[in-house]
Amino acid sequence: MPASYAYLGPEGTFTEVALRTLPETATRQLVPMVSVPAALDAVRTGEAEAAFVPIENSVEGGITTTLDELVAGEPLMIYREVLLSITFALLVRPGTQLSGIKTVTAHPAAQPQVRNWLKAHLPDAVWESAASNADGARLVQEGRYDAAFAGEFAAARYGLEALETGIHDAENAQTRFVLVGKPARPAAPTGADKTSVVVWQRDDHPGALLEILQEFAVRGVNLMLLQSRPTGEGIGNYCFAIDAEGHVSDRRVGEALTGLKRMCPQVRFLGSYPRAEVDPADVRPPRVGTSDGEFAAASDWLARCLDGRF
Amino acid sequence: MPASYAYLGPEGTFTEVALRTLPETATRQLVPMVSVPAALDAVRTGEAEAAFVPIENSVEGGITTTLDELVAGEPLMIYREVLLSITFALLVRPGTQLSGIKTVTAHPAAQPQVRNWLKAHLPDAVWESAASNADGARLVQEGRYDAAFAGEFAAARYGLEALETGIHDAENAQTRFVLVGKPARPAAPTGADKTSVVVWQRDDHPGALLEILQEFAVRGVNLMLLQSRPTGEGIGNYCFAIDAEGHVSDRRVGEALTGLKRMCPQVRFLGSYPRAEVDPADVRPPRVGTSDGEFAAASDWLARCLDGRF
Amino acid sequence: MPASYAYLGPEGTFTEVALRTLPETATRQLVPMVSVPAALDAVRTGEAEAAFVPIENSVEGGITTTLDELVAGEPLMIYREVLLSITFALLVRPGTQLSGIKTVTAHPAAQPQVRNWLKAHLPDAVWESAASNADGARLVQEGRYDAAFAGEFAAARYGLEALETGIHDAENAQTRFVLVGKPARPAAPTGADKTSVVVWQRDDHPGALLEILQEFAVRGVNLMLLQSRPTGEGIGNYCFAIDAEGHVSDRRVGEALTGLKRMCPQVRFLGSYPRAEVDPADVRPPRVGTSDGEFAAASDWLARCLDGRF
Amino acid sequence: MPASYAYLGPEGTFTEVALRTLPETATRQLVPMVSVPAALDAVRTGEAEAAFVPIENSVEGGITTTLDELVAGEPLMIYREVLLSITFALLVRPGTQLSGIKTVTAHPAAQPQVRNWLKAHLPDAVWESAASNADGARLVQEGRYDAAFAGEFAAARYGLEALETGIHDAENAQTRFVLVGKPARPAAPTGADKTSVVVWQRDDHPGALLEILQEFAVRGVNLMLLQSRPTGEGIGNYCFAIDAEGHVSDRRVGEALTGLKRMCPQVRFLGSYPRAEVDPADVRPPRVGTSDGEFAAASDWLARCLDGRF
């Protein structure tokens, strides 16, 4: 029996499409789960080798359900990320014309992405929410609604056809997914990596967030995401989910993390993994003085100082 | 006809209870709306004088719907905040015993607050989600479910009785609500105020968030909330909703805001207003050198330098 | 009787040469003084309109006598600076050959500048210190020594000839002189100005110097000199003489100075004045967000926030 | 033949008194030298085991001759520091009355310390400078002058008597001396140590000094001295002599030094040594998160992250 990857289901959604971009899925059993917590719990209990869930999108920002599940409970680690551009198709039963569409459906998260298109092309259509985009397509197949917004890939599965494709409001609508497993050795550094951590600040310490950011800045580590999440200890108490450029085995990143570990009451390492779909032009070289070679040379020098040989 | 306050409905929820703590509601018409956007739009169109909506809670953190509505669209301003402790009662039809409860309902947001209580006292009860806690109570009244988690205050409205009160999982479960209106002169400073702004960082500028925080830190202004929100320009592009201690008319706050205005491509002022339920012991005096008196003295000195009289 | 400028004498030194580069000296009486304190006291007592003294050179750094006189006592202000490249000539009585030179003299400060030249060309010559370079030339004239290192300009005054010119060890050996007067309105800004202040740090406050530098950095003001000077209150107690880019009437500089004034127990303004011999290529434009126009726009915006009109 | 310590002579000055407070001087030959460079060169050439020279005093600040000698040339290291309170005695030939004193002498550095006393008690006495305070005493012995300001300890050596003792102007007039040797293993940490380094900033890099200070601040290392010294590459080019709290073997100090080594074109380690005459109340414990134990715990944690075992 092949190892299984749990993912946020149902089948036929963008999550599954993103998941299938990972080569190893060819040899894995892919198991849709009803929720992000369910998918992650499947990893924690050992039912699944890994879970594939959305963690950030360009409309909602950090996906709080996913972040909160990673922040609390038994530790998990991120091993891969996948970026997927999100554009919708308008799926209908074969033969349906635009003029014949009175009702449309999709998951509520699709609404901000198709709102302008609807206003322009189907101003009078009535919107009904579905449990997922795939479920919306199924309901169109069953005749409950006239059209569904979903990924174009869902048409074949539900015997529908795409009357229109490439529908999206925000430019660059994207979702970032992560493959999560139990803690183990991180993927090897590739030169374009990302490290995720959660950092708790000291209680009632003005300037604590500034100090957290300085631990990164002083070592030349850029941040790519900072998302505050409540700690559950009352309003105004936050921890921070942070994505930083670089790999935990890069010395600048490692030193920054130990700085956080020393200064903060709690730090949770969430993994180092290759950045997805990264434009080589966006990969900044380490700032002067922050490469591994420079770290090693400085450590050698310090050893000589401690020894009085210089 | 009295001026009206729109609020996130329906009637009989925690939002209404929080709203009614404002003295002026005695002379206002209180109008429940189906959503936060609807409530805020009522202000923008002039239908309502103000809108009362949740903006932060101790379980979810910043309420993204509310933040996103304030970040975009026609400017609005926050005039008041209300903090409400959230504890649930288990409401049943008169005569129902704990042992007779097979189904329970409430808004999904209530679930994390009552999960442990359910596990301990009603491990076999089936949970069904309701559109709101008030709606859950109504469904119990109608006999659809055996019990609803809601505010104790909802019992009388729906002819139910509270079998248990004070149910909550997280200590200090609280929700923060704000009263929002069209831009006008902010409330007068009280000495324990809060200022809300949204700040956009310069594109692709490593360290931009650090610089934003330093504009506050160098003037001794403490932050109480920092919530990143996507700008809608693609994944990884964020603006920051920030709550700072102090009033826009405090010189340290005003100078920090002008610093942000100069450095950042966009800053949106969301208002200065009295901090709710503030413990006087938590009101930190301005750091050395940051009181209005010290600002005025330094300005006088600078004027003398410019004049060569010293 | 024309107004007089006191300067660090005697006549015929680099100081006088630098002073004479100021056009207005054509209409001033130039009065050599025996010491920097004497020159500055002549201003304080009203005997001289201004004093011209060295304040920094590329070998010694800040001239501590001058700095200490400006730091303490009745306030004075800097109105002009002059940079002079320092190269020495070897002055001899007419007819003297290099091979005939057994003794050389000059002010001790000249020694590091001519040491290598001496080693190469006159390895056996005996060095004797003189009270000033001009005095050394006089002693050669009188036959006490065979040669003097001095400015080439001194040859004519003492009937000597320059056997060699352009002698200097360090590349770019320069001295910076300042014209100091009683406090009055600073010179108008030129776009390439410098502002001098002395700042005292709070006692025993770790990180105080960092905070001082941040007041400049956060407003994009670059520093050109930072020289610690003892406060006279025991070892380890220092104040800092600071030269910053820009003019006190530039808003970024003015705001930084008020920041220092608020945070530090004492700040002494020493003047804003045109930078000397500045290469236009070295004049950095204000950092984004720190020009006067951006300051004015941000102030307007703040006024609108305070008024609720936006 | 015992090992020798060179020191800034002549005999009978404060430097010798300070040197003799070191217990090991009982078994060393103490050799007065004519200048600080001569004393340090004696170490470099191997003639002396160590040199004892002044490095900072409460009137002049950093002693630039000493700093410049340590900054350039073959590396040396500081092994000890001694703090000496400086008060003068007025030494006269036996029988001399105050009323009979017409001429006084001392090293010029003594003048600011005795100026007020002179004005009050000997307003008409003529001051003549001596090459050292000890030399002044000798000249009084020889009858050249009537009185000399010197350390009281010099009276016996020159057959003089102290007409007045405890003369000093500034409160807490102190001089700090250091014992300098060739590089070798630093003294063991004592818990109240000091580390001296010289740091060069990157050319023409605004904010370079701020970055240097942040390398210390982010690791909770306090600074005790920052003295800029010209690099010899033209006016405005400075390096910084820095004294930091702590020992190079303290991990917070070591990491700060490697940070400097990475960021700056050059760093020269000048030694770690026990702080002199330190009041235990002035020894600040390491800031939260900066003790060696916390560094070790964070390194362990990082190792577990790299291994995926947590």
Image (cartoon, coloured by chain):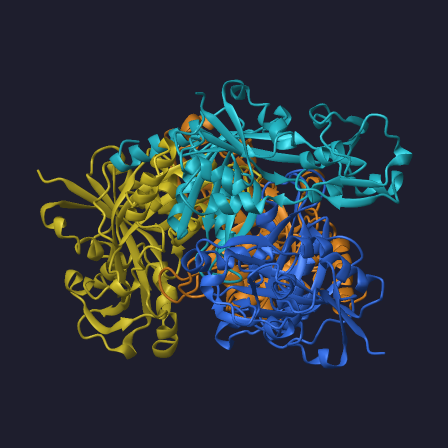
Chain colours: A cyan, B blue, C orange, D yellow
Q: Is residue C49 above or below residue A306?
A: below
Q: Residue at x 76, y 45 (%)?
A: A128
Left or right of C213 in this view: C119: left
The quarter of the picture where residue A304 lies is top left
Give coordinates of residue C238: x percent, y percent: 43, 60
Q: Residue at x 29, y 71 (%)?
A: D167
- Which of C47/B121 is in front? B121
Q: Residue at x 31, y 44 (%)?
A: D297
Q: Is residue D48 above or below residue B265?
A: above
Residue C7 seen in this snapshot? no
Q: Residue at x 49, y 45 (%)?
A: A69
Quadrant position of the C terminus of chain A in the picture: top left
Give coordinates of residue C285: x percent, y percent: 71, 44
Residue furthest toward the right? Answer: A99
Left or right of A103 in this view: A306: left
- Which of C45/B174 is in front? B174
Left or right of A40 in this view: C216: right
- Which of C118/B18 is in front? B18
Give coordinates of residue B148: x percent, y percent: 56, 62
